[in-house]
Image (cartoon, coloured by chain):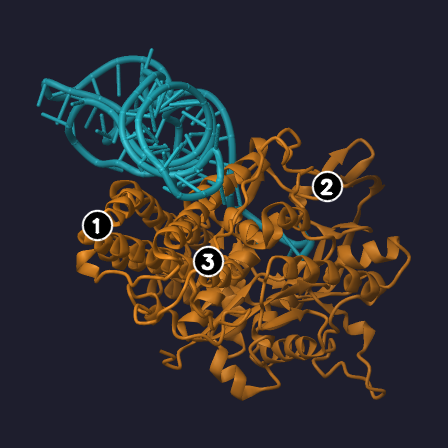
Chain colours: A orange, B cyan
RNA sequence: GGCGGAGUAGCUCAGUGGUAGAGCAGGGGACUCAUAAGCCCUUGGUCGGUGGUUCAAAUCCGCCCUCCGCUACCA
């Protein structure tokens, strides 16, 4: 039921300074699930993810490695795309802040802010690290040798003053407070919203949006000169004296570039404002305070919702990072759990609204308990019994009222949809798996093997009941298998194949029937078919062999 | 320091006044369709500490301890 409703969602763009860790891609997997769900519902869906490439750190790292910044980021971006492919991430566009249309978008935003009187020349001063640029006062340390940056203790910091353009964030304080009040679900979860509101009420300061000096001049050229005229030179290049756009100002704009701004007004009118920005808790302020103000300044609408997710933490609650060496490699993770298994366990084991400590063990336990034992085995035993007792011919499920499973399904589906659309991705799966548990109980309560025996002995009623029970169980497998498609896109077709159903969705979730119609109990009851030979969906993993003692860093 | 959140079974957490719960992990049993999976039963907790209100407190109030988040320009 494609009702023409559109859904535009984004992830934060990843900082392209290294290979991606699973803790970074977690967010993208979650957003991909939401995107797939909307596609399968029939919404005209647009899912944007990509990379943030203009930081000073990146420029400096490239200099350190003796190559161009462009070469440096191209390599990192390739790592991201490979890992995302391995995890079946299917964006409608992978945006890079070095893309030409994004550069145009960022410059246009600066021009609009300037035309609107929202930017002005000022001075920015602070401790400047030759390696990392300006440092936050809270990040520097006073020592006997002077002020140093903890990351490079041997390099003394310089107190520098720059002439910068400032954005008049202070002018938007009242409007931001009003926006938060009028749109209580603008920022979620609620405790994040409260934190942001507290920040706004504490008073907003203007922030600088340009940089005079970056290594190699890396960044998007600032399009306006000090005198307020265009910084475009006669030879078609940008005046280096104008500096570059500060990387955060540049980065946020990717969300509108990805919607068609400013080149394609028609597309932009369709896709903007975004329905959902999925972001990490560390960048909530930029997305919920700076970003709306930037948009309003340019005469554009704020995004509708911003969801702030938590982090995967290593044992002891430590944040995962490359430098700590306690991160999980997404490619190793996919190798161990499979593409679908990896997506499932990371989204089931980590609540999407807060942090969670994870370990290799915890993921293996979750995989075995939920995927191999509960659902995989349910499908396996159901298909096996259908083959053994009914010659492989798939019986239809009983009408909802005649079947405990059929009766319970509508509640399960409603809760699943509520949780999923409310970004509680872990709770959505929990609802589905409660239903799986119910189906396993039905097997033991009905004992199809006993019914089969009685039927063989001439009890026609037992045969009738056997067909009904197995029909219900097969239907339960079909429904769960289909409902989890956003989470486990390649498992669903395998479930359908074993059950003898055709499967019509494409690899990104587009193209099939509106999923809610197909998710009704008995929706395909009229289709005859035969089950195939049973084949385990999720082979059990051995905890010992999976690297029990290695910790998350060395799977 | 200020504001906010949390401390309940080995692990992850639910439970806001009335005899301590779930899932996973551990133990036992019956069954056998199945990936030794599933089902049933079960071990396990002075509900962070302390004082108070109450007939009754994990739940309300005071104080204390521990942990976490936010407290602006690395991204």
User: Is the residue at mark 3 from the same chain as the one at mark 1?
Assistant: yes
Distance of label 2 from label 3 (alpha carbons): 27 Å
User: The residue marked by circle 1 belongs to what chain?
Assistant: A
Disc 1 from disc 2: Cα separation: 70 Å
Mark 2 lies on residue: A323
Q: Work out whether mark 3 precedes mark 1 in sequence or the reverse, and give the earlier one.
A: 3
| Residue appearing at x 77%, y 83% in the figure | A232
Judged from this view, the residue extending furthest toward the right is: A66
Q: Secondary structure at mark 3?
A: strand
Q: Secondary structure at mark 1?
A: loop
Q: Dividing the picture into quarters, in which one does residue A213 lie?
A: bottom right
What residue is rendered at 78% in x and 54% in y?
A160
In this image, A7 relative to A167: left or right? left
Q: What label does residue A458 carry, if any?
A: 1
Within 10 Å of the Cα at label 2, are there few (<14), some (14-19), or many (20+) other Cα atoms? few
Q: Using the rendered image, report if marks 1 and 2 lie on a common chain.
A: yes
What residue sits 42% from the left and 50% below the top? A384
Query: Which quarter shows the N terminus of chain A?
Result: bottom left
Q: Position of residue A199 (x, y in %)?
A: 47, 52
Q: Which residue is mark 3?
A: A307
Whether residue A510 is situated above or below residue A354 in the rendered picture: below
User: Label 2 marks which chain's residue?
Assistant: A
Lower sequence index among marks 2 and 3: 3
Residue at the spot x=37%, y=54% of the render?
A: A386
A123 to A3, vertically: above or below? above
Rendered-image quadrant of the C terminus of chain A? top right
């Amino acid at each position: 039921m494609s009702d023409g409703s559109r859904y535009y969602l984004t992830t934060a763009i990843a900082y392209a300074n290294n290979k991606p860790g699973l803790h970074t891609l977690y967010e993208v997997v979650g957003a991909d699930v939401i995107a797939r769900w909307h596609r399968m519902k029939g919404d005209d869906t647009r899912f944007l993810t990509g990379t943030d490439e203009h930081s000073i750190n990146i420029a400096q790292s490239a200099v350190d490695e003796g190559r161009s910044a462009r070469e440096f980021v191209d390599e990192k971006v390739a790592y991201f795309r490979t890992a995302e492919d391995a995890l079946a991430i299917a964006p409608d566009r992978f945006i890079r802040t070095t893309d030409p249309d994004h550069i145009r978008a960022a410059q246009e935003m600066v021009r609009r802010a300037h035309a609107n009187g929202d930017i002005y020349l000022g001075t920015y001063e602070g401790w400047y690290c030759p390696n990392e640029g300006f440092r936050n006062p809270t990040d520097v340390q006073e020592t006997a040798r002077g002020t140093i940056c903890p990351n490079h203790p041997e390099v003394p910091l310089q107190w520098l003053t720059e002439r910068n353009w400032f954005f008049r964030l202070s002018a938007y304080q009242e409007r931001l407070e009003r926006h938060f009040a009028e749109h209580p679900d603008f920022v979620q979860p609620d405790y994040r919203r409260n934190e942001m509101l507290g920040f706004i009420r504490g008073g907003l300061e203007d922030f600088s949006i340009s940089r005079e000096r970056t290594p190699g001049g890396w960044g998007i050229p600032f399009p306006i000169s000090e005198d307020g005229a265009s910084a475009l030179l006669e030879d078609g290049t940008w005046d280096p004296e104008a500096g570059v756009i500060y990387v955060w100002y540049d980065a946020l704009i990717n969300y509108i570039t990805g919607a068609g701004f400013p080149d394609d007004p028609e597309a932009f009118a369709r896709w903007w404002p975004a329905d959902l920005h999925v972001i990490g808790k560390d960048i909530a302020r930029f997305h919920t305070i700076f970003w709306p103000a930037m948009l309003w300044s340019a005469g554009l609408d704020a995004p509708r919702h911003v969801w702030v997710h938590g982090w995967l933490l290593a044992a002891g609650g430590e944040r995962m990072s490359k430098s700590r060496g306690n991160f999980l490699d997404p490619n190793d993770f996919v190798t161990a759990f499979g593409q679908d298994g990896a997506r499932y366990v990371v989204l089931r084991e980590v609540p999407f609204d807060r942090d969670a400590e994870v370990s290799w063990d915890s993921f293996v336990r979750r995989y075995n308990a939920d995927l191999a034992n509960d659902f995989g085995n349910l499908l396996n035993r159901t298909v096996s019994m259908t083959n053994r007792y009914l010659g492989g011919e798939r019986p239809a499920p009983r009408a909802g009222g005649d079947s405990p499973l059929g009766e319970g399904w509508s509640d399960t589906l409603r809760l699943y949809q509520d949780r999923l659309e409310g970004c509680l991705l872990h709770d959505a799966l929990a609802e589905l798996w409660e239903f799986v548990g119910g189906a396993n109980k039905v097997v033991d309560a009905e004992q199809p093997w006993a019914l089969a025996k009685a039927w063989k002995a001439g009890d026609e009623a037992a045969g009738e009941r056997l067909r009904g029970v197995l029909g219900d169980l097969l239907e339960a497998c079909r429904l769960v298998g289909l409902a989890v498609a956003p989470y486990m896109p390649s498992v669903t077709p395998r479930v359908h194949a074993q059950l003898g159903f055709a499967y019509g969705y494409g690899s990104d979730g587009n193209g099939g029937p509106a999923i809610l119609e197909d998710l009704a109990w008995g929706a395909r009851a009229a289709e005859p078919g035969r089950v195939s030979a049973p084949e385990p969906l999720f082979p059990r993993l051995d905890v010992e062999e999976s690297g029990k003692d290695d910790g998350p860093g060395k799977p």
